[in-house]
Image (spheres, coloured by chain):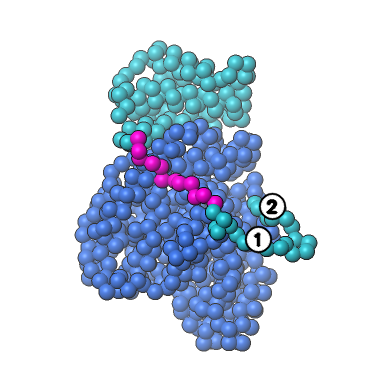
C-alpha cells in the first residue's frame, strides 16, 4: 500500500516538490517549447485532492514533461485538457499500484516464440507483384 | 422494388429467400444501395458506398447460385464493414483526417473470409476517428461527422462502430462488421437496438484492421438477431497465420451449432448485481422486465457479483500505453492536431508518459483478474446485466461529463478478452432502445450466442424497427 495516501502537504511544499521534479525531468540545455509554470493549488484540476502528495507531484511532473517537449503546440484550453489528463492518469496509477501483487505475479502477456512451424509458408511472388513489405500498412 | 419489411429481415430469412431463388442478390443489393444512398447521408452512416463493386459481387453471387453453387447463409447478403478494415484499392480512412486518403493494396482477413462465403460488401461504415483511442468528447469526433441514431436523429449511435450500428438499425444492409477495444460493439448495439457480438479475443483475425490496442482489439458482427451474429461469426472466426494473436486452429474455429452439453443442461445465468451503480429510469424498467422473464427460459438465474478491484484503471493504463505505441508517430509528429475532437488532439500526449513499469503492473493485475473471472464462471455459463445504464445520448452532449458512469464490466470483459453480446430488451419512455448484455467465459462464445438466441425466441424486441423516412 502507498503509505503516503491521505497525507497532506502545504502549498509551498507542493510547489517546491513540483519545481524540483520537473526540473529534474528536463535535461540540461533543453529549451522549453512553451511556458510551463508550476501549478499552484488553485490551478489544480478537479480530483487532484484525491491524490497522495507524491501522486500530485508526479502528475505535475508528467504535465511539465509534456509541456517541455510539446508545450508550443497547445493553446490554453488544450493545456488545461492535458493537465486534467495527467491527473486522471495519476489517479489510475495510484489505485493500480496499491493493488497487492506478489513478486511472482506474472503479467498477462507472454512471448510467443516464433517457431518454424508457425511461419506462413513462403510462396513465390507473382511476376510484377509488389514486394511483401509494400503490402503492410 | 422490394418492400421495406424485406430489407429489415434477418440474414436467416433473407438467406432462405435467396437459396430458394425467390430473391435475387442483385435485386437485394440494388434495394439496399438505393436506401443507403437516400438515408445514409441523413444519418452519416457511411464513410463510403461501393455501388460498382457491390453490384459486381452480387451478380457473381447470383450466377453462382443459379449454377447450383450455393455457399451458405451469407451468400448474396449485402453488408457494411467498419472503415478500419482494409479493402484492396478502396479508401480506408480509420475515420480520421490524417488517414483520409489511405488506400491499402490488400484485403483484411475478415473481408476475405466474408467474400469467400459470398457476402456482398456494400460500403464502409462511418466510425469515430481512430476508434476513439486518443479519447473524444463529442459524437462529432469523426471524419464523417456525428452518426445519427435511426430511432431519434437528435441522438447519437454511440461509438466507435457508430456507422455499423446505424446501418443495421435503419435497414441499410443485411448486417455490419464492427470492432471493440472497450465498448465499441456493445454500446452502439445497445443504443441502436440491434444485436452486437464481441467475440473472445483471438478468435477473429485482425490482419488488415487498424491496430489501436494490440491486446484489446476485437472484431465482431452487428446484426438484427443473435442467430444472425452466430452465422456471421462462424464465417469470420478462425486461426490466421497473418495475425499471431489468433488462437490455435482448434480454439479459434467456430461452427454454427450449440455445444452438446449446453443443449442438454440449459444455461445457468448469473445476474450481475454490481455491474452498474444506477440505471436511468427508462433503462431500469426495461432491464427489470428482462430479468423477470429469464427464469422461464434458462436452467437457473441467480445473483452474481463481479470481483472488486482496479480493473478500469488497469484497462485504461493498458489502452493508453498501447495507443502510445500504435499512434506514437502521429502524436509525436504533431499530426494528431488534424483530428476533429478537442480531446483526441491532446489525449495522446498523456498516453506517451505511461511508463513500462506501470504498463507491466497493469498486465499483472490483468492476469489476476482473468483467474478471478474464470473462477466466477465455474458457477455460471453466462453473466447478464444491462449493456449500458443509459440510453442513446443527445448528439451535442459532452461525453466525458455526460456519460461518465463507471464501467467495470466493460473493463473486465475487454481486459480478459471475454465474449459478450448485446440484444435489445425494451425501450425507454422516449422510445430509445435498451440493451441486455450476456457475457461468457473466454472461448465459450457458443454459450453467449445461445443465451441471446434463447432470449430472442422468447421476446420480440429485436423485431422492432425505427421509422426512418
Task: Give the colour of chain B.
Answer: blue
Residue segment shown in magenta:
A103-114
Instruction: Give residue B129's position: percent from left, percent from top.
Output: 56, 48
Q: Toward the viewer: B204 or B232?
A: B204
Point out residue B91 in the picture as x, y percentages from the top left corner: 66, 57
Picture coordinates of residue B138, whole percent (x, y) = 50, 45
Which residue position is annotated with label 1? A122
- Residue, x 51% and y 87% (percent of image)? B20
Taking the magenta stretch, the answer to whether it contains residue B411 is no
In which quarter of the view is residue B399 placed? top left
Kindly tell me whether residue B427 is visible in this rendering: no
Helix, strand or loop for the magenta stretch, by majority: loop
- Foreground residue among A39 and B383: B383
Choose between B201 and B38: the one closer to the eye: B201
Q: CA distance from mark 2 to mark 1?
A: 14 Å
Q: Residue at x 64, y 36 (%)?
A: B333
- The residue tagged with tag 1: helix, strand or loop? loop
The mark total stands at 2
B416 shown above or below B170: above
B356 shown above or below B373: above
Q: Colour of chain A?
A: cyan
| Quadrant of residue B27 within the rendered picture | bottom right
Q: Is residue A22 above or below residue B167?
A: above
Say which of marks 2 and 1 sits in front.
1
In this image, B387 relative to B33: left or right? left
Camera sees residue A46: yes
Q: Which numbered circle lies on residue B66?
A: none
- Residue linked to disc 2: A133
- Are the numbered discs 2 and 1 placed on the same chain, yes or no? yes
- Mark 1 surroundings: few (<14), some (14-19) or many (≥20) residues within 10 A: few
Q: Pinpoint the chain carrying mark 2.
A: A
Amino acid at each position: 500500500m502507498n503509505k503516503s495516501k491521505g497525507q497532506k502537504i502545504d502549498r509551498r511544499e507542493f510547489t517546491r516538490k513540483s519545481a524540483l521534479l520537473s526540473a529534474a525531468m528536463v535535461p540540461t540545455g533543453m529549451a522549453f517549447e512553451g511556458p510551463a509554470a508550476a501549478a499552484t493549488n488553485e490551478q489544480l484540476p478537479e480530483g487532484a485532492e484525491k491524490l497522495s502528495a507524491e501522486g500530485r507531484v508526479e502528475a505535475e511532473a508528467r504535465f511539465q514533461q509534456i509541456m517541455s517537449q510539446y508545450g508550443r503546440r497547445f493553446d490554453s484550453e488544450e493545456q488545461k485538457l492535458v493537465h486534467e489528463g495527467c491527473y486522471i492518469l495519476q489517479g489510475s496509477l495510484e489505485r493500480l499500484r496499491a493493488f497487492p501483487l506478489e513478486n511472482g505475479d506474472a503479467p498477462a502477456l507472454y512471448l510467443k516464440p516464433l517457431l518454424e512451424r508457425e511461419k506462413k509458408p513462403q510462396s513465390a511472388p507473382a511476376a510484377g507483384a509488389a514486394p511483401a513489405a509494400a503490402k503492410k500498412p | 422494388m422490394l418492400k421495406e419489411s424485406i430489407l429489415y429481415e434477418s440474414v436467416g430469412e433473407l438467406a432462405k429467400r435467396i437459396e430458394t431463388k425467390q430473391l435475387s442478390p442483385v435485386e437485394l443489393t440494388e434495394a439496399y444501395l438505393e436506401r443507403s444512398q437516400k438515408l445514409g447521408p441523413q444519418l452519416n452512416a457511411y464513410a463510403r458506398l461501393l455501388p460498382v463493386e457491390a453490384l459486381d459481387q452480387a451478380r457473381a453471387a447470383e450466377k453462382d447460385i443459379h449454377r447450383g453453387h450455393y455457399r451458405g447463409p451469407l451468400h448474396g447478403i449485402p453488408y457494411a464493414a467498419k472503415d478500419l478494415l482494409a479493402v484492396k484499392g478502396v479508401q480506408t480512412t480509420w475515420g480520421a483526417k490524417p488517414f483520409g486518403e489511405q488506400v491499402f493494396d490488400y484485403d483484411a482477413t475478415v473481408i476475405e473470409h466474408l467474400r469467400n462465403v459470398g457476402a456482398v460488401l456494400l460500403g464502409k461504415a462511418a466510425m469515430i476517428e481512430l476508434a476513439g483511442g486518443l479519447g473524444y468528447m463529442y459524437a462529432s469526433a469523426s471524419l464523417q461527422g456525428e452518426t445519427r441514431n435511426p430511432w431519434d436523429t437528435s441522438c447519437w449511435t454511440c461509438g466507435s462502430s457508430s456507422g455499423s450500428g446505424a446501418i443495421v438499425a435503419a435497414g441499410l444492409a443485411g448486417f455490419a462488421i464492427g470492432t471493440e477495444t472497450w465498448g465499441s460493439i456493445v454500446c452502439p448495439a445497445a443504443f441502436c437496438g440491434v444485436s452486437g457480438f464481441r467475440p473472445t479475443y483471438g478468435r477473429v483475425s485482425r490482419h488488415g484492421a487498424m491496430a489501436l490496442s494490440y491486446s484489446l482489439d476485437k472484431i465482431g458482427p452487428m446484426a438484427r438477431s443473435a442467430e444472425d451474429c452466430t452465422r456471421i461469426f462462424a464465417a469470420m472466426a478462425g486461426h490466421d497465420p497473418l495475425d499471431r494473436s489468433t488462437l490455435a486452429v482448434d480454439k479459434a474455429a467456430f461452427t454454427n451449432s450449440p455445444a452438446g452439453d449446453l443443449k442438454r443442461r440449459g444455461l445457468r445465468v448469473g445476474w450481475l448485481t454490481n455491474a452498474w451503480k444506477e440505471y436511468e429510469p427508462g433503462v431500469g424498467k426495461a432491464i427489470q422486465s428482462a430479468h423477470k422473464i429469464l427464469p422461464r427460459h434458462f436452467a437457473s438465474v441467480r445473483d452474481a457479483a463481479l470481483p472488486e478491484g482496479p480493473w478500469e484503471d488497469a484497462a485504461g493504463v493498458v489502452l493508453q500505453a498501447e495507443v502510445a505505441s500504435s499512434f506514437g508517430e502521429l502524436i509525436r509528429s504533431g499530426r494528431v492536431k488534424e483530428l476533429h475532437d478537442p480531446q483526441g488532439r491532446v489525449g495522446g500526449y498523456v498516453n506517451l508518459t505511461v511508463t513500462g513499469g506501470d504498463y507491466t503492473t497493469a498486465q499483472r493485475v490483468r492476469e489476476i483478474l482473468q483467474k478471478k473471472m474464470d473462477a466466477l464462471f465455474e458457477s455460471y455459463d453466462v453473466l447478464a446485466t444491462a449493456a449500458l445504464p443509459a440510453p442513446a445520448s443527445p448528439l451535442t452532449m459532452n461525453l466525458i461529463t455526460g456519460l461518465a458512469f463507471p464501467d467495470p464490466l466493460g473493463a473486465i470483459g475487454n481486459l480478459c478478452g471475454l465474449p459478450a453480446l448485446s440484444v435489445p430488451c425494451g425501450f425507454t419512455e422516449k422510445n430509445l432502445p435498451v440493451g441486455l448484455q450476456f457475457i461468457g467465459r473466454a472461448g465459450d462464445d457458443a454459450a453467449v450466442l445461445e443465451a441471446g438466441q434463447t432470449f430472442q425466441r422468447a421476446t420480440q424486441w429485436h423485431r422492432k424497427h425505427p421509422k426512418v423516412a
